[in-house]
């Protein structure tokens, strides 16, 4: 047998405890990113990864700083001093191996996982229950606003919709913050990164646009807004002009969607908002005619799981008069959830329908979806359903 003659105390033979722990947590994140892993397991791995990383910085890295402040040069078998370990961890963070300040958007996470926002909300709720939510800084924003009720693509900026596109939500929760308030002062999305850096006491070693939202520097945030069109042309608005356009956009959205929690709300934008939220049986019932409507993927409603509810209902008209204009009511479990017109994809083609319903209209298991033609009165004529 060959004798092992390598010095057993050689630091090259050992992994650093803290850096090895980071490698382990990276493998947890890779499991969360693996599409072959079941969805709920991936969400669980996300929670484990976040909780582990929180503990790592709050306990282990904090312990290294305590040693550094106390002048203690405690080294393990790997012979790395506390200052060397901190420098290596910082290098990993700045290189992107550990993402800092990542904004968790429910819509983005839901799209990445191919599910609705319900399981994402549940995962964030569990983070809150674990205490991680309280200790975290959370920022919710968007890359641009949305233009409603105007012709054209709602995300492309132009001088007519600039008041819509320029305005985005910005919600900031600081660590251990318990109460909030609405601050109507003018800030910009480029101010988000400097705000994160100020709160976590990190001085970026690269040039950063924008200014922190907190502290004396906020007085230097410009009151003008500058945006670029796809062509490269700049659109510059004064704060007064932006607020005037904002008021116009708000009036338009209130006309479209209403205000507050009163029905019909967001799902009442169809041709008959007075029907939304009412029992289908409360309206005059007409006998079925020769026209009918066929649902797409009707089997989806036979076994609904609320972690991925089928909130988009589509289909097409069939039978007689399937090319004639028609307003429709969609009832879910006996209650009208939305109304919508049937539209013609091209001239002379059978009409189709596509409508969103609220998640709250569905429940786990089998759900009944009934389609009606809305006629004068209003009265409801059955078209079909599940």
Image: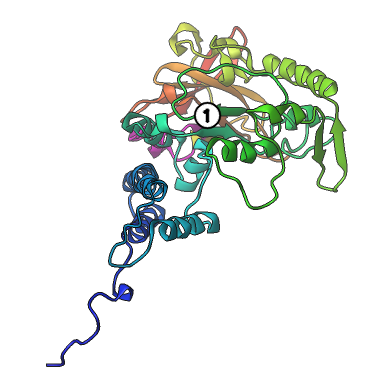
The residue under label 1 is 292
- Which residue is drawn at the image coordinates 21% and 87% (left, top)? 5
Q: Nearer the viewer, residue 303 or 326?
A: 303
Query: For residue 98: magenta?
Result: no
> Could you tell whether 76 is left or right of 195 in the image?
left
Q: How many marks?
A: 1
Q: Nearer the viewer, residue 149 or 141?
A: 141
Query: Is residue 68 something one can see in this rendering?
Result: yes
For label 1, the SS is strand
Q: Nearer the viewer, residue 202 or 196?
A: 202
- Whole-percent x and y of residue 53? 38, 47
> Could you tell whether 70 is left or right of 291 in the image?
left
- Identify the image quadrant of residue 203: top right
- Which residue is drawn at the image coordinates 16% and 92% (left, top)? 2
- Magenta range is 296-313
The N terminus - image quarter: bottom left
The C terminus - image quarter: top left
> Could you tell whether 383 is left or right of 121 in the image?
right
- Identify the image quadrant of residue 251: top right
Q: Nearer the viewer, residue 160 or 24?
A: 24
- Which residue is drawn at the image coordinates 41% and 32% (left, top)? 135
For residue 67, above or below residue 217: below
- Whole-percent x and y of residue 284? 51, 7
Query: Is residue 317 something one can see in this rendering?
Result: no
Give the colouring mode of the picture.
rainbow
- Whole-percent x and y of residue 360? 43, 22
| Residue furthest out toward the front | 71
Query: For residue 310: magenta?
Result: yes
| Residue furthest out toward the left | 1
Badge 1: residue crowd in 10 Å (few <14, some 14–19, many ≥20): many
Most prominent secondary structure in the magenta stretch?
Answer: loop
- Which residue is drawn at the image coordinates 72% and 30% (left, top)? 147
């Amino acid at each position: 047998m060959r004798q092992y003659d390598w010095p057993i105390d050689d630091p090259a033979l050992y992994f650093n405890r803290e850096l090895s722990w980071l490698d382990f947590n990276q493998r947890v994140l890779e499991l969360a990113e693996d599409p072959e892993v079941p969805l709920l397991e991936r969400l669980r791995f996300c929670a484990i990864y976040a909780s582990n990383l929180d503990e790592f910085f709050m306990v282990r890295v904090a312990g290294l700083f305590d040693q550094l402040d106390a002048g203690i040069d405690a080294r393990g078998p790997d012979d790395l001093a506390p200052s060397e370990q901190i420098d290596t961890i910082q290098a990993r963070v700045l290189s992107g191996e550990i993402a800092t300040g990542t904004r968790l958007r429910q819509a983005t996470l839901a799209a990445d996982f191919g599910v609705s926002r319900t399981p994402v909300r549940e995962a964030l709720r569990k983070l809150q229950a674990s205490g991680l939510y309280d200790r975290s800084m959370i920022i919710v924003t968007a890359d641009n606003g949305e233009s409603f009720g105007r012709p054209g693509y709602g995300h492309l900026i132009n001088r007519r919709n600039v008041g819509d596109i320029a305005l985005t939500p910005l919600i900031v929760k600081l660590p251990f913050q318990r109460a909030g308030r609405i601050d109507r002062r003018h800030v910009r999305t480029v101010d988000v990164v400097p705000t994160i850096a100020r709160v976590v006491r990190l001085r970026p070693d690269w040039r950063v646009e924008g200014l922190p939202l907190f502290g004396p520097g906020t007085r230097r945030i410009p009151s003008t807004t500058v945006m670029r069109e796809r062509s490269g042309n700049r659109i510059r608005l004064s704060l007064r002009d932006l607020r005037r356009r904002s008021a116009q956009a708000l009036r338009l959205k209130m006309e479209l969607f209403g205000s507050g929690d009163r029905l019909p709300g967001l799902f009442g934008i169809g041709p008959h908002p007075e029907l939304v939220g009412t029992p289908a049986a409360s309206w005059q019932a007409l006998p079925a005619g020769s026209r009918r409507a066929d649902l797409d993927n009707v089997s989806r409603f036979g076994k609904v799981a609320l972690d991925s509810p089928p909130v988009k209902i589509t289909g097409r008209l069939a039978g007689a008069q399937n090319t004639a204009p028609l307003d429709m009511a969609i009832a879910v479990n006996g209650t009208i959830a939305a109304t919508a017109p049937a539209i013609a994809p091209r001239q002379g083609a059978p009409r189709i329908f596509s409508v969103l319903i609220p998640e709250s209209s569905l429940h786990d298991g089998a759900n009944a979806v009934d389609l009606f033609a809305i006629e004068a009165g209003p009265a409801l004529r059955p078209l079909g359903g599940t």
